[in-house]
Image (cartoon, rainbow, N blue to C red):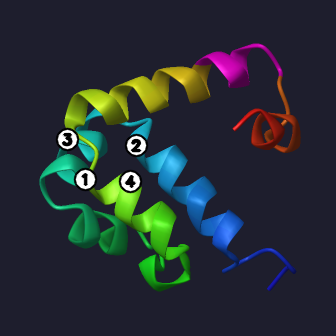
Amino acid sequence: MNSTEGSPSSEIKKLADMISDPGQRKAFADEPEKTATNAGIDVGRLPDEVRSTLFDLSHEELGVLARVKESLDQAGVSREDAAKIF
């Protein structure tokens, strides 16, 4: 296991990748904990504030996050630099 596997940041990355998929995003909006767990995300490793915020987002709000992630990825912004923005 590498040093970041299973860390909060690795679980957040998995979650961000998961909500980039429209079908997964809809499922997550409907049943966030079940969908995240089924996707192999250890929700217990997510910081409480992050988990609470993400689990409360609507399908539309999750879509906005996915669009921001996609635009940052397309612009070549590193995850480290993106983390500084947010």
Of the residues shown, which amino acid type is indicated by label 4? Answer: Leu
Q: Are marks 4 and 2 in contact (CB under 8 Å)?
A: no
Lower position in the chain sequence, tag 2 or tag 1: 2
Label 4 vs label 2: CA separation?
Answer: 10 Å
Label 3 vs label 2: CA separation?
Answer: 8 Å
Q: Secondary structure at mark 2?
A: helix
Of the residues shown, which amino acid type is indicated by label 1? Answer: Phe
Q: Is residue 66 magenta?
A: no
Mark 4: few, some, or many residues within 10 Å (few <14, many ≥20)? some
Q: Residue at x 44, y 73 (%)?
A: 40
Q: Secondary structure at mark 3?
A: helix
Label 4 vs label 1: CA separation?
Answer: 9 Å
Q: Are marks 2 and 1 in contact (CB under 8 Å)?
A: yes
Label 1 vs label 3: CA separation?
Answer: 5 Å
Q: Which residue is mark 2?
A: 19
* Residue furthest to the front: 49
